[in-house]
């Protein structure tokens, strides 16, 4: 079996970053209503960073568009999720 490191996998991924974020996190909801912060643990790209005040720092630029954060978040309205405009976002290719 061929093992592939995370770094090797990331070399097969390209991002064309849109000016407008396709995912927006409402940190006020995170602060007020969320103790689990599931997004921090489920995002395969580690894009959710917990802040000391209970909020979340989020960076959409290297998102894989997998949708896992949207499914895992249990607070309505905390994550606004959509696909990037055509031609933007992630592309995967063979290594
Ligand atoms: S799981 Fe949802 S509500 Fe909780 S911190 Fe993450 S985005 Fe905010
Ligand atoms: S869609 Fe996937 S990669 Fe993008 S922020 Fe959500 S969990 Fe992370």
Image (cartoon, rainbow, N blue to C red):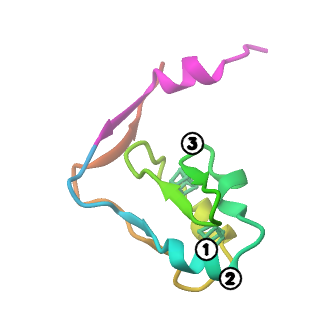
Q: Residue at x 57, y 19 (%)?
A: 7
- Residue 45, disc: 3
How far apart are the alpha carbons under marks 3 and 1? 19 Å
36 left or right, relative to 69: right
Note whether 3 is above or below 44 in the view shown: above
Q: Residue at x 64, y 81 (%)?
A: 32
Q: Residue at x 37, y 46 (%)?
A: 61
65 left or right, relative to 83: right
Say whether marks 2 and 1 touch (CB < 8 Å): yes
Say whether marks 3 and 2 touch (CB < 8 Å): no
User: Which residues are the magenta region?
Assistant: 1-16
Q: Residue 55 location in percent, x, y?
A: 58, 66
93 left or right, relative to 86: right
How far apart are the alpha carbons under marks 2 and 1? 6 Å
* Residue labelled 3 has its Cβ within 8 Å of some atom of ligand 2: yes
61 magenta-colored: no
Q: Under tag 2, what secondary structure? A: helix
How far apart are the alpha carbons under marks 3 and 2? 24 Å
Q: Under tag 3, what secondary structure? A: loop
Mark 2 — residue?
A: 33
* Residue labelled 2 has its Cβ within 8 Å of some atom of ligand 1: yes
Q: Residue 82 location in percent, x, y?
A: 39, 69
Quarter of the image where one finds residue 6: top right
């Amino acid at each position: 079996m061929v093992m592939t490191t995370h770094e090797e996998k990331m070399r097969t991924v390209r991002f064309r970053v849109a000016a407008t974020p396709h995912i927006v996190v409402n940190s006020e909801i995170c602060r007020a209503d969320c103790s689990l912060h599931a997004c921090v643990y489920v995002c395969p790209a580690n894009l959710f960073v917990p802040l000391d005040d209970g909020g979340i720092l989020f960076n959409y630029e290297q998102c894989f568009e997998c949708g896992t954060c949207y499914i895992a978040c249990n607070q309505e309205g905390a994550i606004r999720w959509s696909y990037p405009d055509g031609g933007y976002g992630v592309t995967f290719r063979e290594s």
